[in-house]
Image: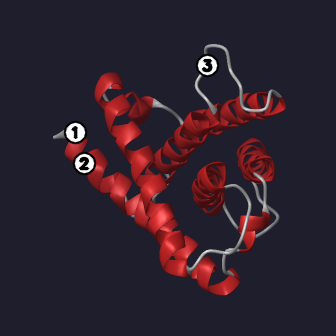
Amino acid sequence: MKQHKTAEEFARAKAECRDLFEKKLKDYGTSWRIMRPMSLTDQIMIKAMRIRSIEEKGVALVNEGIRPEFIGIVNYCVMALIQLELGPGENLKPAECMKLYDEKLNSATRLMENKNHDYDEAWRLMRVSSFTDIILQKLMRTKEIEVHDGKTLVSEGIDANYMDMINYALFALIKTNPDA
């Protein structure tokens, strides 16, 4: 029963992210395709740092809370996963872009389902601020791996870190959902 509730909540949070991604795709196209994965990592870092700043200060001077930033983390991570696969390049047709978006987000979902099974919903006991800190830690790891041209000795690669960040950001969206 627990898994079912998580699956539903996860699906709603993913739909919120996908909806915004698709709307921005209509506004901007795939202009992000010019970016290298390292630049996307930096964009994710900016989002996570703003979340932490708001959490610590208790106030945001720009009239947006932390939810849009967590959505941004999900969407930038998906973009980064696409860029890892395709490399920077030509714009994509909207249908192809959304197909890739769904593939990457579904891969992250399968990872969450497997880990959630093994960890038995432990994320529900965590604070949103812990998700922020873990995302920042994953970013530091990613940046270090990028310095080493993506090579690791025993650790997971850049793609695994992006997928973990997607999942922690989605958990944060579930926990901060005003309708829940």
Read off the residue under disc 2: 5
Read off the residue under disc 3: 155
**Could you tell me which quadrant the C terminus lies in?**
bottom left
Kindly identify the residue that appears in the image at 72 percent across and 28 percent down. Answer: 141
Judge from the rendering whether residue 43 lies leftward or rightward of residue 112; answer left or right: right
User: Type of residue at label 2?
Assistant: Lys
Under tag 3, what secondary structure? Answer: loop
Question: Where's residue 122, x and y in %?
Answer: 39, 27
User: Type of residue at label 3?
Assistant: Ser
Under tag 2, what secondary structure? Answer: helix
From the viewer's perspective, is residue 60 above or below residue 134?
below
Question: Where's residue 97, x and y in %?
Answer: 54, 71
Kindly identify the residue that appears in the image at 23 percent across and 40 percent down. Answer: 3
Find residue 134 and name its label: none
C-alpha span from label 3 to label 1: 30 Å
Read off the residue under disc 1: 2
User: Which quarter of the picture shows residue 119?
Assistant: top left
User: Which quarter of the picture shows residue 36?
Assistant: bottom right
C-alpha span from label 1 to label 2: 5 Å
Crowding at label 2, few (<14), some or many (≥20) Cα neighbours within 10 Å? few
Q: Are marks 3 and 2 in contact (CB under 8 Å)?
A: no
Compare residues 54 and 17 and report the one nearer the observer: 17
User: Type of residue at label 1?
Assistant: Lys
**Could you tell me which quadrant the N terminus lies in?**
top left
Question: Where's residue 131, x and y in %?
Answer: 58, 37
Q: How is the image coloured?
A: secondary structure
Q: Are marks 1 and 2 in contact (CB under 8 Å)?
A: yes
Kindly identify the residue that appears in the image at 37 percent across and 52 percent down. Answer: 10
Compare residues 103 and 24 and report the one nearer the observer: 103
Question: Where's residue 7, x and y in %?
Answer: 28, 49
Specify the farthest residue to the left: 1
Under tag 1, what secondary structure? Answer: helix
